[in-house]
Amino acid sequence: MSKQIEITSPLVDYLLSVSLREDPLLKELREETARSGRQGMQIAPHQGQFMRLLAELIGVKRAIEVGTFTGYSALCTALAMPADGRLVCCDVSEEWTSIARRFWQKAGVAERIDLRVAPAAQTLDALIAAGESGTYDWLFIDADKSSYGIYYEKGLELLRPGGLILVDNVLWGGDILREEADLDPEKDRDTLALQAFNRKLLGDQRISLSLVPIGDGLTLARKR
């Protein structure tokens, strides 16, 4: 099997120099998040641009995001949606999402975004209970890794056939390669959960699958 070219830092710098078109407002949001010292929780700008392009390609009108933080990925998605689009954002932090709300307002997309500050599984269950199964085009998962399997199953129920699930951090900074026997069930819960999640999706015939080595690894799963 032929191998992929090694993505070195200089190559990433070149990639960004010839392809990144980051909106000034997105850059401002990214820089404000960086000043908080928690920028590692935010997707990379070229990943956001890639996701925005995907959303435009499939014509996303109804979307869900699990794990919003300061709102960068949600803003990328909302900017790709029509004025009558709807993005349900799930997060548990009023503090971080207050930054998100401010930037959504500045971007003129706040009306498209329905922020639910509550455990994401409860929000997804509420959408299912409201009869919204099979009506969404898009689900982005970027939250607590040990619950990825729960969000995935509930999201698959909510997506229409042909809808797309995107899952962040599936390469987990390279820790995904660590041997399971060397991992501590408590300290390495996230790594173990991601390893199990990746194996699960490989065998899941309900989806078409690709794992893209962008950012920290982004899985694309299209519901069949």
Image (tube, rainbow, N blue to C red):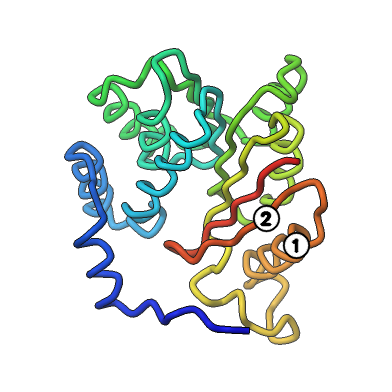
Q: Position of residue 99 (x, y in %)?
A: 31, 34
Q: Which mark is residue 189?
A: none
Quadrant where the image shows the C terminus: top right
Q: Quick check: 178 left or right of 133?
A: left
Q: Against 185, is 150 above or below?
A: above
For the point 33% across and 54% down, which residue is it? Answer: 46
**Three-letter code for the amino acid on which mark 2 is drawn:** Leu
**Three-letter code for the amino acid on which mark 1 is drawn:** Leu
Q: Quick check: 34 left or right of 56?
A: left
Label 2, residues with CA under 10 Å away: few <14, some 14-19, many ≥20? some
The tag earlier along the polypeptide, 2 or 1, is 1
Q: In this rendered view, identify the residue nearer to me: 155 or 53.
A: 53
Label 1 residue SS: helix
Q: Which mark is residue 202?
A: 1
Label 2 residue SS: strand
Q: Position of residue 186 (x, y in %)?
A: 69, 70
Q: Against 115, is 15 above or below?
A: below
| Residue farthest toward the front in the current orientation of the protein | 2
Q: Which residue in the protein does label 2 denote? A: 209
Quadrant where the image shows the N terminus: bottom right
Tag 2–tag 1 contact (CB < 8 Å)? yes
Q: Quick check: 73 left or right of 195?
A: left
